[in-house]
Amino acid sequence: MSDIPNSEEQTYWSGPSGQSWIRHEAAQDRLLSEILRTVLDRADLSAGERFLDIGCGTGALSVAAAQATGPTGRGLATDISQPLLRRAAARLRQAPHVSTLLADAEVAEWPETGFDVALSRLGVMFFAHPPRAFANIAGALRSGGRMVFAAWAPVARNPYWRDPARLATDRLGDVSKTEPNTPGPMGMADADWSLAQLRSAGLEDVACEEVEVGLPIDGSAEDAADLALAIGPAARVVRLHDASPADVAAIRDDIAHDMQQYRDGGTVRIPAVLNLYTARVR
């Protein structure tokens, strides 16, 4: 898989960032639980349906979709990262009707087609050539098949992405910014641009809805700061600056202070906004 369009993403998610996600899987699943539920609710899966999970990560969405479609259904969980996919396969052992595929969705040769729905929880923002990727995903679906993809809305609408990174750069200095409409967590933040990519792939009934969700982190504001420094935007700033332990400790204090405003009993619940994309195959 070295000559693939998204090789940089493969390297990124197969390395320390992917391993960090696996280590913090329970916290990440909790953090993204409302996003997962939003995708499932919109997909409206039925028993016996066949689903394709794009960018499945460690498999949380596939596990939930497997439960929704039941033993008469069929699922294929795909990811570009071998470590993440290996973990997803382990979680799916109790769902023999779901298989896994190491693949770049942009160029994957699907082992089977005719799926009813393609799903993604934050896995479609990283394509080098989005129209080609969406067209290839469409090729795995039956005529009339549907797509439901969750992506982040702009950084300005998402404190989880905006504020920890800002606090880290306030102390350490700026890092290179990702250009708009390029692969990365905010790769589909511009709804108008993203809808054009979906239409260019030949899809129909293309739409985007902004959905407000919460990002829950069980525990204290300090626990929320630890997660932000383990995986996410602040972690990137700290890594690129090779921050000292003293700097990391100071940034942790600043993030924890900021997170206090989101405390709700024993949980920190950070408000977030998604772009929920839907489309159909002709």
Image: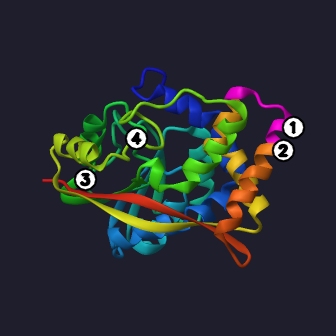
- The numbered mark, 3 or 1, whose residue comes first in the sequence reads 3
Callout 4 secondary element: loop
- Residue identified by numbered label 4: 187
Q: CA distance from mark 2 to mark 3?
A: 48 Å
Q: Residue at x 33, y 37 (%)?
A: 109
Left or right placement of residue 263 versus residue 69 in this view = right
User: For the residue marked with disc 3, what is the amino acid?
Assistant: Leu
Q: Which mark is residue 249?
A: 2
User: For the residue marked with disc 1, what is the amino acid?
Assistant: Ala
Asked whether the residues under the numbered discs 4 and 1 touch, taking CB atoms below 8 Å apart as contact, a structural biologist would say no
- The numbered mark, 3 or 4, whose residue comes first in the sequence reads 3
- Residue identified by numbered label 3: 141
Asked whether the residues under the numbered discs 3 and 4 touch, taking CB atoms below 8 Å apart as contact, a structural biologist would say no
Q: Give the label, 2 or 4, closer to the camera.
A: 2
Q: CA distance from mark 2 to mark 4?
A: 30 Å
**What is the quadrant of residue 210 in the picture?**
bottom left
Callout 3 secondary element: strand
Q: Find the magenta span and give its range.
A: 240-249
Q: Residue at x 74, y 58 (%)?
A: 257
- The numbered mark, 4 or 1, whose residue comes first in the sequence reads 4
- The numbered mark, 2 or 4, whose residue comes first in the sequence reads 4
Few, some or many residues within 10 Å of mark 3 (<14, 14–19, 20+): many
Q: Vertical placement of 162 versus 258: above or below?
A: above
Q: Give the label, 3 or 1, closer to the camera.
A: 1
Few, some or many residues within 10 Å of mark 1 (<14, 14–19, 20+): few
- Residue identified by numbered label 1: 246
Q: Give the label, 3 or 4, closer to the camera.
A: 4
Q: Residue at x 72, y 46 (%)?
A: 230
User: For the residue marked with disc 2, what is the amino acid?
Assistant: Ala
Q: Give the label, 2 or 3, closer to the camera.
A: 2
Q: CA distance from mark 1 to mark 2?
A: 5 Å
Colouring convention used in this rendered image of the protein: rainbow
